[in-house]
Amino acid sequence: MCIGLPMRVVEPDGSFAWCEGEGERERLDMMLVGDQPVGTWVLAFQGTARQIMTEVEAANTLGGRKALAAVLAGSGNIDDFFADLVGREPELPEHLRKAS
């Protein structure tokens, strides 16, 4: 399974940028997303910024990573990590809903 890490741009460096996330600092290739200003969230995988993320997307992804770590460690309440999903019914995307 491949899981990207949300990282925030802290220092542009040409077609690369120094980024930080979950206590890690990494120099990422920015060619797929272009130059990004300091503070931009990106999804990092294998030394490359794969996509730009909103702050909400980054927070949700980090929550998912923390939930996975808790499950693998055999601790924690999974609902604590997915509060936005607890107590609601999932909805189909618009294109899969029946036309009325």
Image (cartoon, rainbow, N blue to C red):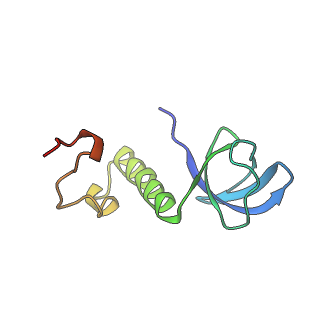
Write down the quadrant of residue 6 in the picture: bottom right
Q: Position of residue 68 (x, y in %)?
A: 39, 47
**Image-based side of 67 in relation to 83, left or right:** right
Tell me the residue at 76%/54% (across/down).
35
Tell me the residue at 73%/64% (across/down).
37
Kindly tell me whether residue 74 is visible in this rendering.
Answer: yes
Q: Position of residue 97 (x, y in %)?
A: 20, 43
Tell me the residue at 24%/39% (across/down).
96
Q: Nearer the viewer, residue 79 or 7?
A: 7
Q: Position of residue 79 (x, y in %)?
A: 26, 59
Seen in the picture, residue 14 relative to 3 is either above or below; the reply is below
Q: Residue furthest front?
A: 100
Kindly tell me whether residue 93 is visible in this rendering.
Answer: no
Seen in the picture, residue 9 relative to 32 is either above or below; the reply is below
Q: Residue furthest top?
A: 1
**Image-based side of 60 in relation to 98, left or right:** right
